[in-house]
Image (tube, rainbow, N blue to C red):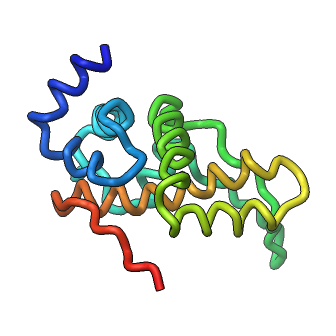
Amino acid sequence: MDKTITQISTQNTDINCLTSVPGIGPVYAAGIVAEIGQIERFPDESHIAKYAGLAWLPHESGTSVRQATPRTRKGNQYLRYYLVEAANSIRRYDITYQRYYHKKYEKVPKYRHRRAIVLTARKLVRLVEVLLRNHQFYIPPKVV
């Protein structure tokens, strides 16, 4: 299966854009592109995150806004899976995502890895949206 996906993915420019990110292989890239479909369907990255189920429910009562809210359980579970697994892989190779993951990991006392990786996946959605919309390859930021 992996060989077939790799052969097919070399012909698709969107998959090539995503595989330029260190940590995203042809399987994750093909899954993300297949589940998103045409990027033009989504006005911006927040709509992609909601579609994937990487959004949190608002909880407001009067003038108070609750800070700790649960993540929505709706959305495309396959896209969510590919984004979370890709984010977990990227954090091993990209220092920016690694720092972001550790920052979120240290913030909470419970369910640290799960929360940090979902927030890292939410950050990855922004990158995926830009790469697919502009049909460009990933250029890693310079580490200072």
Frontmost residue, 75 versus 136 = 136
Q: Is 83 left, or right, of 33 in this rendering? A: right
Residue 90, image x and y in percent?
48, 51
Q: Residue at 42% of width from left, 47% of height from top?
A: 23
Outermost residue toward the bottom in this view:
144
Residue 135 found in image quarter: bottom left
Residue 108, image x and y in percent?
84, 61
Outermost residue toward the right in this view:
109
Say how many tags the image has: 0
Q: Residue at 13% of width from left, 35% of height from top?
A: 10
Frontmost residue, 95 versus 71 = 95
Q: Is 94 left, or right, of 35 in this rendering? A: right
Quarter the N terminus occupies: top left
Residue 36, image x and y in percent?
33, 40
Q: Residue at 65% of width from left, 37% of height from top?
A: 73
Outermost residue toward the top in this view:
1
Residue 45 found in image quarter: bottom left
Frontmost residue, 17 versus 72 = 17
Q: Is residue 26 positioned above or below 88 on the image? A: above
Q: Residue at 46% of width from left, 60% of height from top?
A: 46
